[in-house]
């Protein structure tokens, strides 16, 4: 390979403005794609709520979602998915879930650098990711959660990965990646060499290599009943020989703790948000609401 020549002399601007403009445009495209992914789910929930509570327009339905999201600290995407997938409330009931039993928040058995604040989804997922990366000995990774509406995985937490990687893998379907295989089989999956492992389809392989990852390890986040509700993956810039039995055992604990916590959050905090939304919708029936 020929060595690069000398850079531009004093006063020369080179290609820096063009590179900055290109990156600005790429960031805009990524942002538009993110909005396009979220819009159908939120729009679907708006339609459901507008009809259910006799709201005059879609903006009022959005405001209803927004208030419940902010009040219970549940992301709009998660709350919209719950509105679309959870059985609708009985029209005669004041409560959406009149027979619901609230369970205590499960503890994390692994030691986190910072004990997460109770009920804080982002902090718990951050602790799951940090522990996984510490065990795997790397600083690149992500946490995905199950998207019940689309039957796949969506990234909710990440570190050390490029914006293009996060954009490409924002949603992962049932095939073509190591995390999809781990979710499908309910077992940990090690990819020792991304470049040659047949688990990847070619677009996914190219996106991972472009991000500087040469190996990865995926751990399913599973409930007590063995249901996969998410995934945590560690990426390495070097090929791997595989993890030890001791490392795999620790990551089994991390996956079980993370999965049980996510299941508790869905059955408790998300349902609390739906209860609040239902109470507010009944109270504001037929009334125009304004988004914040």
Image: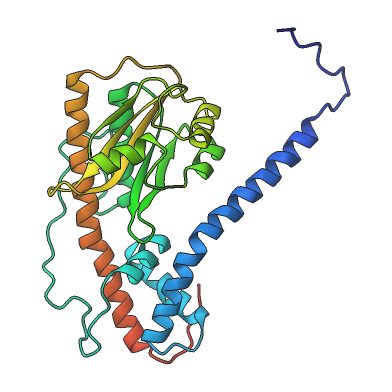
Q: Position of residue 18 (x, y in %)?
A: 79, 36
Report whether 1 appears left or right of 45: right
267 or 289: nearer the viewer: 267
- The image quadrant that residue 252 belongs to is top left
Report whether 173 appears left or right of 290: left
Name the residue rendered at 27%, 44% in the picture. Answer: 116
| 61 versus 189 height, above or below | below
Q: Position of residue 162 (x, y in %)?
A: 53, 35
276 or 237: nearer the viewer: 237
- The image quadrant that residue 130 belongs to is top left
Q: Position of residue 151 (x, y in %)?
A: 35, 55
Farthest top residue in view: 2
Name the residue rendered at 38%, 23% in the picture. Answer: 138
Which colouring convention does the figure follow? rainbow
Whether residue 216 is visible here, answered yes or no, is: yes
Whether residue 118 is visible here, answered yes or no, is: no
Quarter of the figure with the N terminus: top right
| 65 versus 104 height, above or below | below
Name the residue rendered at 12%, 48% in the picture. Answer: 224
Report whether 207 appears left or right of 221: right
Report whether 124 appears left or right of 150: left
- The image quadrant that residue 218 belongs to is top left
């Amino acid at each position: 390979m020929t060595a690069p020549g000398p850079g531009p002399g004093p006063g020369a601007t080179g290609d820096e403005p063009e590179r900055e403009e290109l990156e600005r445009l790429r960031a805009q495209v990524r942002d538009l794609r993110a909005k396009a992914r979220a819009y159908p789910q939120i729009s679907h929930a708006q339609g459901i709520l507008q009809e259910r509570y006799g709201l005059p327009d879609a903006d009022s339905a959005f405001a209803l979602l927004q208030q419940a999201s902010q009040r219970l600290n549940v992301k709009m995407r998660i709350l919209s998915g719950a509105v679309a997938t959870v059985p609708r409330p009985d029209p005669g009931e004041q409560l959406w879930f009149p027979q619901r039993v609230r369970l205590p928040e499960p503890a994390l058995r692994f030691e986190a650098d910072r004990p997460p604040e109770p009920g804080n989804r982002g902090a718990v997922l951050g602790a799951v990711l940090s522990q996984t990366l510490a065990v795997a000995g790397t600083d690149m990774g992500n946490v995905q959660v199950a998207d019940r509406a689309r039957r796949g995985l969506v990234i909710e937490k990440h570190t050390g990965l490029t914006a293009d990687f996060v954009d490409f893998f924002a949603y992962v379907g049932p095939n073509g990646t190591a995390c999809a295989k781990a979710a499908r089989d309910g077992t940990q999956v090690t990819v020792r060499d991304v470049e040659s492992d047949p688990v990847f389809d070619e677009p996914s392989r190219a996106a991972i290599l472009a991000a500087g990852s040469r190996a990865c390890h995926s751990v399913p986040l599973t409930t007590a009943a063995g249901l996969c509700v998410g995934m945590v993956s560690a990426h390495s810039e070097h090929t791997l020989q595989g993890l030890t039995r001791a490392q795999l055992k620790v990551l089994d604990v991390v996956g079980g703790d993370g999965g049980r916590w996510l299941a508790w959050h869905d059955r408790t905090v998300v349902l609390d948000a739906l209860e609040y939304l239902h109470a507010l919708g009944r109270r504001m029936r037929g009334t125009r609401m304004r988004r914040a």
